[in-house]
Amino acid sequence: MKKTLLLNSQISAAIAEMGHTDTLVISDCGLPIKDGPKRIDLALKRGVPGFMETLVTVLSELYIEKVIMAEEIKTHSPQIHREILKIVKTYAEVEYISHADFKIKSGEAKAVIRTGECTPYANVILVSGVKFDQ
C-alpha cells in the first residue's frame, strides 16, 4: 500500500482490506450508522474534521471507480456538491440515489468514516476500483 497523506491506522486498515466494488462511506456527523459496517469516528467537534479534507485524504490512498451521493445534496448543499465533483468527476462515475436509499446502502459498506461536518447531505459512498497500470 502506498503511504500518502493518511495517518489514521483504522482508515488505512479499512482501505487495505477493500476489494473491487467494496464500499467505504465518508459521512457528516448526522448520518445514522448501522451495526454492520466498521465505524471509524473522527468527529471531534462541530466541523472538525471537515468532510472535504477527509475525502481528499482518503482518496490519496483509495482508488475508486464510482461515487454515490444522495440526490438531495444538489439542492440542499450545492457548494459542497460542486467541490466533490471537482475532485472526483474526472476519474470516477457519479451516481445519485435518494437519501433514504443512501442510508440503506451505507449499511452495506465495509466501513463508515464519521466526520465533524455539519453540512446537510455531506456524505459519499466510495466504490473501490482496481488500478492495473501501476
Image (cartoon, rainbow, N blue to C red):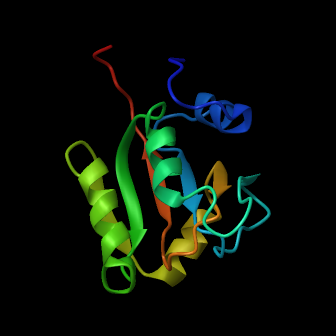
What residue is drawn where x is 32% and y is 72%?
79
Front in this rendered view, residue 75 or 65 = 75
Where residue 31 appears, x then y in whole percent?
64, 73
The residue positioned farthest toward the top in the image shown: 134
Q: Nearer the viewer, residue 45 or 120?
A: 45
Location of residue 4 in the rendering, given as x and y in whole percent from the top left corner: 50, 24
What residue sits 48% from the left and 30% below the top? 61
Above or below, comparing residue 38 to residue 79 in the picture: above
110 or 114, nearer to the observer: 114
- Which residue lies at the image location 49% right of the left edge and 40% below the top edge? 57
x then y, percent, for residue 74? 31, 79
Q: Is residue 119 above or below residue 125?
A: below
Residue 50 shown left or right of residue 66 in the figure: right
Please tell me which residue is depicted at 53% across the width and 44% down the height of the picture. Answer: 22
Vertical relation: 19 (above or below) 85: above
For the C terminus, the quadrant is: top left
The quarter of the displayed image where residue 33 is located? bottom right
Spot the residue most to the right.
35
| 119 lies left or right of 44 | left
Q: How many marks?
A: 0
Q: Position of residue 77 (x, y in %)?
A: 38, 79
Q: Is residue 84 above or below residue 72?
A: above
